[in-house]
Amino acid sequence: MSGLRKVHLSLPASTEDLRRLQLGDVVYLTGRVFTAREGVYKRAVEEGVALPASPAELGSANFHCSPAARIDDDGTRTIGAVTATASFRFAKWLDGWFALSKCNIIIGKGGMTSADYRSMFVPHAAIYLTTVGYGTGALLGRGIKNVVAAHWIEELGLAQGVWVMDVENFGPFLVESDLDGNSLFERENAKIEPRIAALYEGTKPPTLRRFGETDDRSDEVI
Amino acid sequence: MISAATIERTAEALMAKAAIEIPEDYLTGLRACAETEKGELSAFVIQAMLENYDAAKEDRRAMCGDTGVPRWYVKYGNEARVEGGPVALEAALRRATATATHDVPLRPNRVHPLWRTDHDNNVGINAPEIDYAFHPDGEWIDLTTVHKGGLFGTDYRMLFPGDGIAGIKRFYLDALVAFGKRGLACQPAIVGVGLGGSKDACMVLGKQASCLRIVGSRNPDPKIAALELELKALGNSIGMGAMGFMGSSMVVDCNIEVGYCHTGGMPMSVHMFCLSSRRASARIHADGRVDYRTDPEWFTSYSRRATVEWDGAPRARAAE
Ligand code: SF4
C-alpha cells in the first residue's frame, strides 16, 4: 500500500488548512469548485468583464479543466468525466486572477514553476494541487455531486465556460506547491537529473540542428 | 452490401467503447509496469489509473475528461460494397461522431484553429480525419476509431544516415525526457516511432505505430523488433515514471514502423499514446454481422508491402 499521506479538505479551505499540507500529500476535496481557463482569464482579467457570480458563489478552488459535458435542450447539465488541462500556459493571468477571484487553490495538470509560485501564489496564500495520471477523469467525475451553474457558455462554449460544481471526496489530487512556493515536480526533476547525463552517453548531437535549440538567430543549424 | 445504417450504428458504439473501455493489451502492459515500479509516487499514480478504468466501465463514463480528438481509420476488403458508396460511409462516420459526442458525453474538443469556433460535436473543417486502407480479399470493412489525447509527446526530426542508431536513440530520449517531465505526455505510453518515408509519411507511420498497433506486437523485421525492445528498455531506464515522478514506468511498449525514404535522409518521428490509449475496432461483414475487437489489425504484410507487387498478389499475366 502506498505510504503517502491522505488528507480530506473542506472547501473553502483556510490558510491554516493549507499550511498543514506537504508536497506529495494525497488530497480529496469536499465543497465547491469551478472551472476557468484561458477563455475566462482573458475575458475577466484582460477585458475587465465582471465575473458571472460572486467569489462565494463560484467557490475558492479553480479547476483548469473543460469537462466532458452536455447541456440538453431542457437545460439539464450532465458532466461525465473531468480532467485537467496543462496549467503552465495560464501563468501570465494568475496574479490578476487571484486578486479578482479570491481563490486559494488552483487545480490543474503539471503545475507551474516554483518561480511562478513564489511570485504569484505565495502573496495570495494559494497552493497548487495537481490531478493524478493525468487521466483519472472518471474517478473525478464520480466526485461531482451537483452541477450548480454553467456560466459564459454562450460566450465561450462548453469547453471554455465556467462550470460550478459541488463535490464530495473529489480526488485524488497531489499537493504540488505549498504555501512557501516549493514544487513537487521540481523536487522530483532534481532527483532524476543526475541519471540523465549517463543515459545520453554514446549518443551524439544530430547532424542538423534547428532553431529553438539555440536562441541566437545569428547561429546556423549545421 | 453493407448498409449505411449499420455503419452509423457501429460507429456510435465504437465511439463509446473507445472513450470508456481501456483496451486489454494496454491494461496488461500497464499492470506489468506497476509490478516493477519502485517509485512511491509513480506507483500511486498507476494504482489510481487502474481504479479509474474500473470506474469508467462501471459508470459508463469517459475514462478521461479530455476525450481527445476522435478520428477514423477505415479498411476495405477488396470485395466490400457499401450502400451509397464511400460518400455515404463518410457521412455516417461524421454523424456518429457528433451523436456520440452528445450521448457519451465526450468533450467537444474540435475547434477552428484561428477563430476557435466550436460546434460542440467534434466535427468541423477536415475533422474528424478519415484514413483508408485496403485488403486483398474479403467483403467486410473494418472501422477503427482512435481518440488520441495530448498536446504533448510528439516530435519530428530530419536525421541523416550518418546519425545512425545513436542518433535515433538520442532523439527518442529527447522526446521522452522533454515531454515526460511533469508527465506532460501522460505516460506510461505506447511510443510509436516512424522512420523514413517523406516528412508527412514519417509522421503518419509513427502515429499509426503508436495508435494502431497493440502492446506486445512486434515489427516483422527481427532487427527492428529487437530495436523496439531496446528502445522500450531505454525509455524505462530514464528514471522517470508516471507524471515524471521518479520511477521506471515510462514506456508500455515501443512500436516502430518504417517506410523507404530519400537516399540522403533518415526522417524520424516520435508519438506517445497516453494513459488513455483509446481505440476500438469492428469488422462489419456483408451480411450485417458486426465483430468488435480492440486490435485494429491495421498493419499487415499487405499494408507493409515491400515490392512492386506484394507476395500474395494474384499475377495478372500468370502463365496459363
Ligand atoms: S494525454 Fe491522455 S490521459 Fe492525458 S489528459 Fe490527454 S487524453 Fe487524458
Image (spheres, coloured by chain):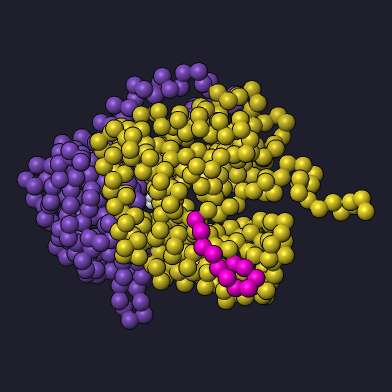
Chain colours: A purple, B yellow
Residue found farthest to the front: B320
Task: Give the quarter of the image for residue A37.
Answer: bottom left
Residue B196 image-quadrant placement:
top right
- The answer to whether B152 appears left or right of A129 in the picture is right
Q: Is residue A89 above or below residue A222?
A: below
Image spot of residue A210 (x, y percent): 55, 31
Q: Is residue B285 magenta?
A: yes
Picture coordinates of residue B9, whole percent (x, y): 52, 73
Residue B138 shows in this picture? yes
- Residue sitting at 57 percent across and 76 percent down? B5
Q: Outermost residue, bottom direction?
A: A74
Query: Where does residue A52 sit, x and y in percent of width and height?
Result: 24, 67
Residue closer to the observer: B251 or A147: B251
In reply to whether residue A120 is colored magenta, the answer given is no
User: Dividing the image into 4 quarters, which one contains the N terminus of chain B?
Assistant: bottom right
Q: Position of residue A198 (x, y in %)?
A: 41, 19
Left or right: B219 with respect to B182?
A: right
What is the number of callouts on the image?
0
Q: Is residue B124 toward the left or the right of residue B195 in the image?
A: left
* B124 w.r.t. A203: above or below: below
Task: Please identify the quadrant where the C terminus of chain B is shown.
Answer: bottom right
Q: Nearer the viewer, residue A103 or B303?
A: B303
Q: Residue at x 64, y 65 (%)?
A: B140
Depth order, front residue of B9/A154: B9
Q: Residue at x 55, y 72 (%)?
A: B8
Numbered range of the magenta stretch: B284-294
Which image quadrant for residue A12?
bottom left
The foreground one among A42 and B290 is B290
